[in-house]
Image (tube, helix red, strand yellow):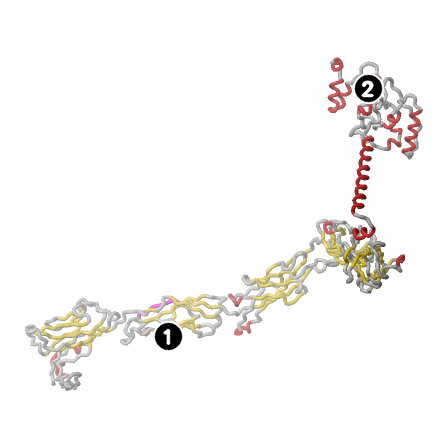
């Protein structure tokens, strides 16, 4: 089925196409008057469609963006051949922006843009147009679609993807080394003119960097840029559209470029020589000082390793690297000695640990410096010649013998004198002593290896001028053994022999011990004493292994004849000097069975065969008890007789002694019990009164002839007895007067009222007040006339 369509005629008016817009509508129709046949296969019917000639054909219309004129912008005109100009047709526009952006005059078909359009927001509008008969409401032409394309103008500047870029590049990079690429975009139409054609240029950062105008790649422009000279660079890049021509719009961005470090600088010491000092007492590990080599690089490129390459103090000092500060710390490695060496010189080397092969030609990447260390002298304690001493001493060494010597000296230049002493906390028994002047040790007490085989003492050496400076040394004294102990039985042996024993039978094996410790070991020998060299009952056999066997020499033994045998045995060693001892072995005779097992060795078994019954034994025990009772009674009576007084009569002159119970001069008389008085009768004063007679008259004791100084006490007593026997004034019991000596008198003389009759008149006791508080009571009783009257 063939259908023929009459298409709407559209008149397009545009400022860009005035030549076309001003042409008459009829001529434009005639221009395309030739017919065109299009054959199309329908999907449903598969029939051929034929189309007649069109009144007007269009593809797209163009409209400028950003129109700023006073009136609305005219787009074009819709017209159909069916329009007779009588107003019966109505033009309707639908699609993108119809009614809002694009307005159509329904009577004339003129299309206008009601608003300013922006191509960057929407560059293409698709509209549909149709013509309707006003009276019937039917379309006189089928709906037709057309496109309005917005023509671009250069109204957008280029914009970079970032407001600021950050980049880094190693220092010393070559010319043309790529740093970073910047990118700018232009919102204008890239297919229409040069509005979107961007060109890059550098506004700031020359002559260090350059930019590719088309790609925006930033590159280095100078060789060997050093981070140490300048690290940060700020580069400003411009992007301009219109191919960079005049009138083009532009945008800029900032690129911050940092030069990263490479190891292109060797370490350098700021000075060639360093001076340090150390006291000689500094212990190993003591830090003395720090040195530092400067390296302009940073990070691992500035890491330095310090070492001592050579010098006379390389074995006395050490250097370590402080990883945080990159300093070299010099420390003491060994003990210093001012007297041995006062100055050391070290050669210290500083080397980079991370080298870059590209810059080895700038090397060497190390540096050297001299370090001089002076040792300061201090007052040091004495130093012994050895760290410890070992002295061997025989245990029989005599007291006072020198056993060894310790030597110490002052290490200082002054060489102060040293005195030695033994730390008594290590020698509580004071067995050892030392000469303080020369350090010789000697024995103060006997030694006994068996009691203490080792002695560990401490010797102290002290400077005489400065006692605070002292040092100690251990001395180990080993006591060497001397054969000074005789061997003896190792234990007590309970030996028995059977009554039915045969000759040559072994009844006991004995062994010995010795407290000594000979270097070759013990060797003991056993023999019978010479008196029993040929014993009739027993013999001894030395087994040559420090034991001996006791053998019987006859057949049969009788308990009734001899119940116990004592066998003395000599044990001696083989050391020098030979020591021996005699041990007695007690051998009991016992009843045994046929196998030699002991059955009985008791005393009852021995008594019963003698014929004593149990009653007889009880009678013997009773007699013994009675005798003991009699002895006890006799002793008791004898002790009672000793307690009876010698003088019973009250008229006996000796009762004065019993009554007064005079024991001497009291606690202040230190000579009351001095037996020397008996040897020296001159000690008695001439004015001493007799206390065993009534003091009616004062008489003088007759002085006897002086005795020699060392006379025997017995002779002295006999002579005194003889003198008193010849003295007519002596009482009958002159022996009492002889032995009643009390010692020296007090300075106050006698205060006894017994002698008051010997003075005429009243005595003056006022002097008692001058004797102090001890005699105050007597002064109150006897002093003054008032007291006498009272």
Crowd around label 2: few <14 · some 14–19 · many ≥20 (10 Å): few
Question: Total number of numbered labels?
Answer: 2
Tell me where residue 578 appears, x and y as whole percent.
85, 59
Q: Quadrant of the C terminus?
A: top right
Residue 14 horizontal/vertical position (percent): 18, 74
- Between discs 2 and 1, the one toward the N terminus: 1
Q: Is residue 203 above or below residue 655?
A: below
The N terminus: image quadrant: bottom left
**253 within the magenta span:** yes
Viewed as shown, does residue 466 lie left or right of 641? left
Residue where numbered disc 1 is placed:
215
Residue 391 or 118: which is nearer the viewer?
Answer: 391
Which quadrant of the figure has residue 511?
Answer: bottom right
Q: Quadrant of residue 109?
A: bottom left
Residue occupying the point 91% across, 28% down: 720
Say which of 447 and 191 sits in front: 447
Magenta stretch, overall SS: strand
The CA distance from mark 2 to mark 1 is 153 Å
Q: Tell which of 182 and 558 is nearer to you.
A: 558
At mark 1, the secondary structure is loop
Mark 1 is surrounded, within 10 Å at the Cα level, by few (under 14), some (14 to 19) or many (20 or more) other residues, namely some
């Amino acid at each position: 089925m063939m259908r023929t369509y009459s298409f709407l005629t559209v008149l397009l008016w545009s400022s860009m196409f005035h030549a076309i817009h001003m042409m008459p509508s009829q001529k434009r129709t005639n221009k395309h008057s030739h017919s065109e046949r299009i054959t199309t296969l329908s999907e449903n019917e598969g029939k051929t469609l034929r189309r007649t000639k069109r009144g007007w054909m269009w593809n797209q219309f163009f409209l400028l963006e950003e129109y700023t004129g006073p009136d609305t912008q005219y787009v074009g005109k819709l017209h159909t051949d069916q329009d007779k100009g009588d107003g019966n047709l109505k033009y309707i526009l639908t699609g993108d922006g119809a009614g809002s952006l694009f307005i159509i005059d329904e009577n004339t078909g003129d299309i206008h843009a009601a608003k300013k359009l922006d191509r960057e927001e929407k560059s293409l509008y698709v509209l549909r147009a149709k013509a309707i008969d006003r009276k019937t409401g039917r379309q006189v032409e089928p709906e037709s679609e057309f496109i309005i394309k917005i023509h671009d103008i250069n109204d957008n500047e280029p914009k970079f993807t970032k407001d600021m870029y950050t980049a880094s590049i190693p220092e010393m990079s070559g010319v043309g080394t790529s740093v970073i690429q910047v990118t700018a975009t232009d919102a204008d139409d890239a297919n229409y003119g040069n509005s979107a054609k961007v060109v890059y240029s550098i506004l700031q950062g020359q002559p260090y960097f350059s930019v590719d105008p088309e790609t925006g790649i930033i590159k280095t422009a100078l060789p060997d840029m050093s981070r140490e000279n300048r690290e940060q660079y700020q580069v400003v890049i411009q992007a301009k559209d219109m191919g960079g021509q005049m009138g083009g719009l532009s945008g800029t961005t900032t690129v911050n470029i940092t030069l990263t470090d490479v190891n292109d600088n060797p370490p350098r010491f700021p000075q060639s020589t360093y001076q340090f000092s150390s006291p000689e007492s500094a212990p190993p590990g003591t830090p003395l000082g720090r040195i530092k080599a400067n390296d302009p690089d940073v990070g691992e490129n500035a890491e330095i390793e310090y070492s001592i390459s050579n010098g006379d103090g390389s074995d006395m000092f050490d250097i370590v690297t402080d990883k945080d500060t990159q300093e070299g710390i010099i420390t003491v490695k060994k003990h210093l000695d001012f007297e041995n060496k006062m100055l050391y010189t070290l050669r210290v080397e500083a080397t980079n640990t991370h080298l870059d092969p590209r810059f080895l030609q700038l090397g060497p990447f190390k540096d050297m410096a001299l370090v001089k260390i002076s040792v300061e002298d201090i007052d040091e304690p004495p130093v012994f010649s050895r760290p410890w001493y070992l002295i061997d001493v025989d245990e029989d060494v005599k007291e006072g013998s020198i056993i060894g010597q310790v030597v110490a000296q002052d290490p200082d230049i002054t060489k102060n004198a040293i005195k030695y002493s033994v730390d008594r906390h290590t020698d509580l028994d004071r067995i050892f002593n030392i000469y303080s002047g020369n350090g010789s040790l000697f024995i103060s007490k006997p030694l006994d290896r068996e009691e203490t085989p080792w002695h560990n003492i401490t010797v102290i050496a002290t400077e005489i001028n400065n006692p605070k400076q002292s040092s100690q040394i251990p001395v180990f004294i080993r006591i060497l053994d001397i054969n000074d102990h005789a061997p003896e039985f190792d234990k007590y042996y309970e030996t028995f022999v059977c009554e039915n024993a045969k000759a040559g039978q072994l009844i006991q094996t004995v062994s010995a011990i010795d407290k000594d410790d000979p270097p070759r070991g013990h060797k003991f020998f056993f023999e019978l004493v010479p008196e029993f060299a040929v014993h009739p009952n027993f013999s001894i056999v030395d087994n040559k292994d420090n034991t001996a066997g006791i053998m019987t020499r006859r057949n049969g033994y009788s308990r009734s004849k001899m119940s116990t045998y004592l066998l003395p045995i000599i044990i001696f060693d083989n050391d020098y000097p030979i020591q021996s001892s005699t041990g007695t072995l007690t051998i009991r005779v016992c009843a045994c069975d046929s196998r030699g097992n002991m059955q009985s060795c008791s005393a009852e078994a021995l008594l019963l065969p003698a014929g004593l019954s149990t009653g007889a034994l009880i009678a013997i025990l009773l007699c013994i008890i009675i005798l003991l009772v009699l002895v006890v009674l006799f002793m008791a009576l004898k002790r009672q007789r000793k307690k009876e007084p010698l003088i019973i009569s009250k008229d006996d002159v000796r009762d004065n002694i019993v009554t007064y119970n005079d024991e001497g001069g009291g606690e202040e008389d230190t000579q009351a019990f001095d037996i020397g008085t008996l040897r020296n009768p001159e000690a008695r004063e001439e004015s001493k009164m007799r206390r065993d007679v009534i003091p009616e008259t004062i008489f003088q004791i007759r002085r006897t002839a002086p005795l020699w100084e060392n006379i025997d006490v017995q002779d002295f007593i006999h002579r005194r007895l003889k003198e008193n026997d010849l003295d007519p004034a002596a009482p009958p019991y002159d022996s009492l007067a002889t032995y009643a000596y009390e010692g020296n008198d007090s300075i106050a003389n006698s205060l006894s009222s017994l002698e008051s009759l010997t003075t005429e008149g009243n005595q003056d006791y006022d002097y008692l007040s001058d004797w102090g508080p001890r005699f105050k009571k007597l002064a109150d009783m006897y002093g003054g006339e008032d007291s006498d009257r009272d």
